[in-house]
């Protein structure tokens, strides 16, 4: 399942539409203001020297989406929350308008990913939780795909495997919670699919 969301449209440039707010000595937009764009998008928040800077809220008219958080030089930067048209939510750090840093992505089905991001893709340590089962995939992502040693925790057992390009390598091991018995797995059919599938869905689709 992709966590690219359905943002679809970029924020509109600052030089068109209806502007209501203050200006500096150079007649640039400055201070608290409201901007209504021709396509009915609305930005309410702070400007500095003609660009969105500081806290603000941007509402897309079509498709409906909302960003609430910090801006720097006209782009999303710092802490913020972005609600996509399909109902998925990202809450965390942005840089240069993209998810970059630590953040949580919540899917429509309730699944979550909490961890590192880079350029809108999962990158760094993180945990993907499957809402329906409570299973957790913990490890390191690189450019959107699980890589290296990872741990998948289910209700009654724990799977440990080495991932390459988002897929678990064999052999792996399964440890049963009730008995602490560990067995080697050489049959991919025994790995399970719910949490494993999350290892390859990185948000850069």
Image: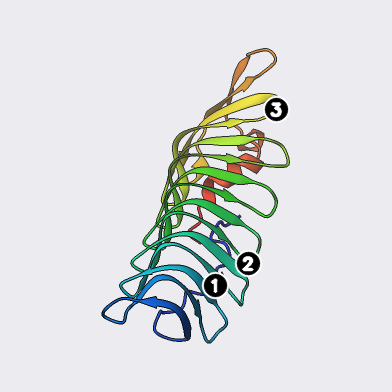
Q: Residue at x 53, y 49 (%)?
A: 200
Q: Is residue 59 visible?
A: yes
Residue 138 percent across, percent down from the top left:
52, 35
Contact (Cβ within 8 Å) of mark 2 with mark 1 = yes
Residue 158 percent across, percent down from the top left:
61, 26
For numbered disc 1, what is the local secondary structure?
loop
| Mark 1 surroundings: few (<14), some (14-19) or many (≥20) residues within 10 A | some
Q: Which mark is residue 64?
A: none
Q: Nearer the viewer, residue 90 or 177?
A: 90
Position above or below: 129 against 33 = above
For numbered disc 2, what is the local secondary structure?
loop
Q: Residue at x 57, y 30 (%)?
A: 186
Q: Nearer the viewer, mark 2 or mark 3?
A: 2
Q: Residue at x 59, y 68 (%)?
A: 65
Q: Nearer the viewer, residue 122 or 46?
A: 46
Total residue callouts: 3
| Mark 3 surroundings: few (<14), some (14-19) or many (≥20) residues within 10 A | few
Report how far apart the C-alphas of labels 2 and 1 lie in the structure: 9 Å
**Would you name the residue on which mark 1 appears?**
8
**Would you name the residue on which mark 2 appears?**
85
Q: Which mark is residue 155?
A: 3
Report how far apart the C-alphas of labels 3 and 1 lie in the structure: 37 Å
């Amino acid at each position: 399942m992709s966590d690219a969301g359905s943002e679809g449209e970029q924020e509109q440039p600052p030089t068109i539409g209806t502007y209501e707010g203050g200006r500096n000595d150079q007649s640039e937009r400055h201070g608290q203001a409201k901007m209504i764009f021709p396509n009915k998008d609305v930005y309410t928040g702070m400007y500095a020297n003609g660009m969105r800077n500081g806290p603000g809220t941007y509402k897309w008219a079509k498709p409906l989406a909302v960003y609430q958080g910090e801006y720097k030089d006209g782009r999303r930067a710092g802490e913020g929350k972005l609600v996509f048209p399909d109902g998925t939510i990202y809450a965390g750090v942005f840089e240069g308008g993209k998810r970059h840093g630590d953040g949580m992505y919540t899917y429509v089905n309730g699944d979550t990913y909490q961890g590192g991001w880079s350029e809108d893709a999962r990158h760094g340590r993180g945990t993907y939780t499957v809402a329906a089962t409570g299973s957790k995939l913990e490890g390191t992502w690189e450019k959107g795909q699980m890589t290296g040693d990872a741990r998948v925790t289910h209700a009654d057992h724990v799977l440990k495997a080495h991932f390459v390009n988002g897929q678990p390598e064999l052999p792996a091991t399964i440890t049963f919670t009730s008995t602490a018995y560990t067995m080697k797995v050489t049959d991919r059919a025994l790995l399970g699919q719910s949490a494993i599938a999350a290892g390859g869905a990185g948000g850069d689709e």
